[in-house]
Amino acid sequence: ETGVTQSPTHLIKTRGQQVTLRCSSQSGHNTVSWYQQALGQGPQFIFQYYREEENGRGNFPPRFSGLQFPNYSSELNVNALELDDSALYLCASSTGANNYEQYFGPGTRLTVT
Amino acid sequence: AQSVTQLGSHVSVSEGALVLLRCNYSSSVPPYLFWYVQYPNQGLQLLLKYTSAATLVKGINGFEAEFKKSETSFHLTKPSAHMSDAAEYFCAVLNYGANSKLTFGKGITLSVRP
């Protein structure tokens, strides 16, 4: 059984650019949640996807968007990058029926300069 | 809205000493509570969870936590610290319902002195 994987591991972008982060769910999981973890802070919920539909969103602007694919992998897209978007981005997968137990990937470290 | 508070940002103990990391929660409904550990440059690993069954919950690596409703607390303990326990620890509460988002505390960095 493979765990949650994320790519890339590190990324450096310039303010104003766009970025796409990718997440592959753990086998059998149909729900993916994305979190932003700024330096020295706890993770903050961005949004969740369940069976390819957005299923809840945290306090993040519309320039944060996502997709979930039929194989339940997911993308997080961020447009018009700002310096404050620099953070570790974590995805977590879970099964719909038992979704309180979320399994986290290793994260993507995004640096915006 | 549900929230968790982790008092103090850094705890330092000697190897072999008791580890106590505090977490208090706020929730209008019976909470599901979690402790996660994060090692440097890694994601989050689930240590243990409380889902309204036994109030004393045992997790991995010798950690345990006790749910105390009267104190709205879910403190994490380990009887004897090991050097490998040095990491960041996050308490989280689950917003179960329409979506299962986790609300995390700010985290506590645990240092273990030889």
Image (spheres, grey):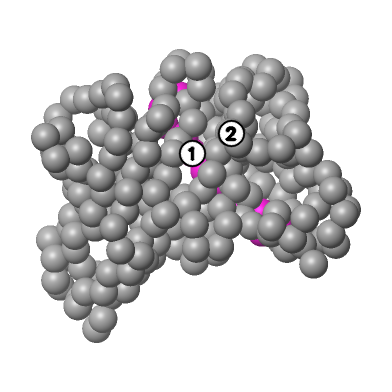
The residue depicted at 45 percent of the width and 36 percent of the height is B102
- Where residue A10 appears, as percent x and y from the top left, is 71, 61
For the C terminus of chain A, the image quarter is bottom right
Residue drawn at point x = 50 percent, y = 16 percent: B98
Output the chain of dot 2. A
* Residue ID for mark 2: A58
Camera-side residue of B50 and A38 = A38
Compared with A4, A71 (above or below) is above
Can you tell which quarter of the image residue A30 is in? top right
- Return the x and y of residue B35 as percentages of the image width and height: 33, 46
Residue at numbered disc 1 = A103
* Looking at the image, residue A54 lies above or below residue B33: above
Q: In the picture provided, is B100 more to the left or to the right than A9?
A: left
Q: Nearer the viewer, mark 2 or mark 1?
A: 2
In this rendered view, identify the residue nearer to me: B70 or A29.
B70
Q: In the image, which residues are magenta?
A: A99-110
Q: Is residue A4 visible?
A: no
Amino acid under disc 2: Gly
Mark 1 belongs to which amino acid? Tyr
Q: CA distance from mark 2 to mark 1?
A: 19 Å
Left or right side of B56 for A49: right
Q: Residue at x 87, y 54 (%)?
A: A16
